[in-house]
Image: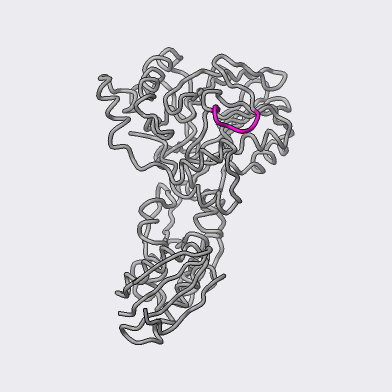
Amino acid sequence: MTVQKWTAAKVARKVIDNEELFILDVRNEDAFQDWKIEGHKFEYLNVPYFELLDGVEEILPQLPTDKEVLVVCAKEGSSVMVAEMLAEEGREAAYLEGGMGSWSSYLEPVKVANLDNGGELYQFVRLGKGCLSYMVISEGEAAIVDAVRFTDDFINFAKDKGAKIKHVFDTHLHADHISGGRHIAAETGATYYLPPKDATEVVFDYTALTDGLNVKVGASKIDVSALYTPGHTIGSTSFIIDDQFLLTGDILFIDSIGRPDLAGLAEDWVGDLRETLYSRYRELAEELVVLPAHFMIIDELNENGTVARRLGELFKENHGLNIEDEEEFRRTVTDNLPPQPNSHERIRQVNMGKIIPDNDEQTEMEIGPNRCAVR
Amino acid sequence: MNITKTLDAKGLACPMPVVRTKKAIDTINSGEILEVLATDKGALSDITAWAKSGGHTLLEQKTEDDILYFYIQKA
């Protein structure tokens, strides 16, 4: 038997196409419990590689023979070793190139919709981390919202589409992942916008993203307008695109809402979060399609791989939008919160430009799920 | 501490630090102590977890100048 090497892109297709896969995850138990490759129809077995050094015979009965088996570890080395051991036992096995590091880094661009006059709206789905970025393309121009740090993915995508990147926005100062926004802007000559209330400590130049700011993308004037919606951070800003789409950043997700504590100010910001979710968003058209900056669970993905839902549906179904009692709301978003994202304080420092870690360190800092939500 | 054997696994990437540690521990007697030097950060959690699962005792672990030191007493 030979050992196959799979790319993160291939695994991403299996997730989006709803295919079956058996994952043998050979990382430590706590690493596996904390964060793994999620798929609608994936099955798992977690056995640390160091328990297999004497051989894989013991786990063979637990591995299916009628399904593809993918061995996964943190970086790659251990999964190659285990996949080769399985092959020696006559089992077909593949390993994930680059391990969970490459899974965390992979972006799948999915088209959300066609806009007027040939315009397009894309969602970049970072399956491994649950991050969602956006690109509006219209008549040779592009605007990007909440870009993750893999700047080439965005720059090359725009290039392939023949579009010049003109505007780059961050809805807020991110705490769970490193933003690529200002680097894309620097490389392409685009304008980089950040909400000033989130930017009091940043050490680079930016353009203020304020309530009511409106930019046009392309000659057909796809409207991108800003709506100040604090709560996850004090500067958090949403966007309405073409009167059809509502980019909510980390304020409102499909199955959860933003948590107010990642900058250490939960008690101060909970009132803002309530006001945004229960007043400002309530004034908007229910037909708007919500496009958040994250998903937390794989069930939030639609069949075509996008993460999008009508605002009206969320008013009905999202628990965080249906807590009538203010005091209960306050408790929900400040008590018993899930653990904070890995390295969130250092990630904020990177996004302020205060520290500049190398690529390996950045990968390490971003390991794990995003954890920006509270349910 | 009376070190019986030292394994230099510096510069080796996962899974080799653990693979070599296992081989080295097979060559010493119960109760004796193996010193392991490694630079792969993953070794921190992996050697610790491996020692625990094998019943060995991790007497001490320290990090100096980006080098991880492990002192493992064989079960």
Q: Position of residue A21 (x, y in %)?
A: 44, 56
Compared across the picture, whether A29 is left or right of A162 comes to left
Q: Residue at x 57, y 44 (%)?
A: A107
Magenta span of residues:
A199-205
Asked if B48 appears above or below A364 in the picture, the reply is below
Asked if A347 appears above or below B73 in the picture, the reply is above
Asked if A11 appears above or below A243 in the picture, the reply is below
Asked if B5 appears above or below A321 in the picture, the reply is below
**Residue at far front of view:** B1
**Quadrant in the picture for residue A315:** top left
Most frequent secondary structure within the magenta stretch: loop
- Display coloring: one colour
Q: Which image quadrant: the C terminus of chain A? A: top left
Q: Position of residue A231 (x, y in %)?
A: 42, 24
Compared across the picture, whether A126 is left or right of A320 comes to right
Q: Residue at x 56, y 51 (%)?
A: A9
Q: Position of residue A235 (x, y in %)?
A: 50, 24
Q: Residue at x 52, y 43 (%)?
A: A126
Q: Residue at x 41, y 59 (%)?
A: A22
Front residue of B19 and A347 = A347
Front residue of A25 and A60 = A25
**Quadrant in the picture for residue A352:** top right
* Number of numbered callouts drawn: 0
User: Is B51 within the magenta?
Assistant: no
**Residue at far top of view:** A283
Q: Position of residue B30 (x, y in %)?
A: 31, 84
